[in-house]
Amino acid sequence: MTDSPTIPQYTLGQMVLYMLRLGALGFGGPVALVGYMQRDLVEERKWIRPEDYKEGLALAQLAPGPLAAQLGIYMGYVHYRILGATLAGLAFVMPSFLMVVALGWAYVRFGGLSWMQAVFYGVGAAVIGIIAISAKKLTVKSVGKDKLLWAIYLLLAAVTVITESEIAWLFIGAGVLVWLLRAPPKWLSKTSVHAASLAQLPVATGWLGGLDVSVLSQIGIFFAKAGAFVFGSGLAIVPFLYGGVVTEHHWLTDKQFVDAVAVAMITPGPVVITVGFIGYLIAGTSGATVAALATFLPCYLFTIIPAPYFKKYGKLPGVIAFVDGITAAAIGAIAGSVIVIARRSIVDVPTAAVALVTVLLLWKFKKLQEPVIVVVAALVGLVLYPLLHT
């Protein structure tokens, strides 16, 4: 069991309230949200021990699904087990889910969100700056100066930028590669490693794609794939969603998908909650609910099922090596996805300036709160967008 020797210094209700607040006010994407949890729960409130946080982060990085949501679930699990994990996860996701459903209703009811284009004009650029700084911190901390991990990081960043999609077997392959190079199992001979072992790894495309099922079933199957086969974060899920929602199923147009990304960026909580907005556009409230449940259920199960065993087996050299490899791959994909999103957010000199100013402010003022930047960027967008696009 992942038992913590200390008595919790907080109640389950306090943890749930914290997750509600983080889900309602936490901007900046998964990397930033993970950083908030470390700052608030470990450093300031001291509810969670550093070693428990690190184990939760490692498990979240190891398993597929949205990084921040999984870590939030694990934070609830540390002292209050399955009940804590369930309530913490629901509290973290629910505020942003309700927001995107409301925005989805407004989008359908009023034929689009013209004001949102102005807001996203500023917020989208600022968020790129927020994510860039957070990604830099995570890269330095997790990749460091390790040449092998840097090679994996750069490869996955390049693949994500070029393909604008995630290739799940590359993540798993990166973990296997580092495992075999640094902590090979005793039973493995030099001649027993061959390409056939990687050929059986799951691929994030085409799974059950040919079934003739209802729209809600199709939504459930597709978004379950997103939750089960996309590693790292909501940032990396964006190109994966584009390939399925726009190219494969033709559920949304390009403009609708960009608007969905805009919704994810201007709302707090996990970026991956954009699945709720997309689901609403496809099939109303039912579509939003199915899409969200299908996306988050795998990450919930991938967290609570291995959690009791992760403390015992998580420090084995082979597991550590595998986590190192898959973490480098995930962070590389996040970095690549930042570029993918930036292509849609940095559209002219003013948006480039907003992103640059955001980076400089966060670099110089370490305690500057990201929501303040988001609000200011939204106001900038509301002022500049009508002037430049009339």
Image (cartoon, helix red, strand yellow):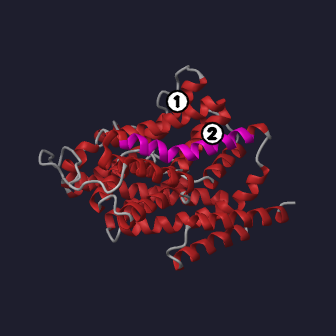
Residue 98 on the magenta segment: yes
- Give me the residue at 39% from left, 67% from top: 44
**What residue does disc 1 label?**
220
Q: Which residue corresponds to the image point at 77% horizontal and 53% vertical from the top-left?
A: 115
Q: Circle 1 sits in a helix, a strand or a loop, which is it?
A: helix
Q: Is residue 21 visible?
A: yes
Please, what is the three-letter code of the amino acid marked with disc 1?
Gly
Furthest-right residue in this view: 390
State yes or no: residue 90 in magenta: yes
Give percent across and percent down for residue 361.
Answer: 58, 76
- From this view, report whether residue 157 is shown above or below residue 225: below
Q: Using the image as rendered, state which of residue 159 and residue 92 is in the foreground.
A: 92
**Horizontal and vertical percent position of residue 50:** 30, 62
Looking at the rendering, in which quadrant would you find the N terminus? Answer: top left
For residue 35, the mark is: none
Magenta region, residue range: 84-107
- In the visual, does 384 lie left or right of 262? right
Dot 1: within a 10 Å radius of its alpha carbon, few (fewer than 14), some, or many (20 or more) residues?
many
Q: Is residue 60 left or right of residue 131?
A: left
| Quadrant location, the C terminus | bottom right
Density class for disc 2 (Cα within 10 Å; few <14, some 14-19, many ≥20) is many
Proximity of marks 1 and 2: CB atoms separated by less than 8 Å: no
User: Mark on residue 278?
Assistant: 2
| Residue located at (73% from left, 67% from top) | 380
Helix, strand or loop for disc 2: helix
Q: Picture coordinates of residue 208 (x, y %)?
A: 48, 27
Q: Position of residue 256 (x, y in %)?
A: 70, 43
The secondary structure that dominates the magenta segment is helix
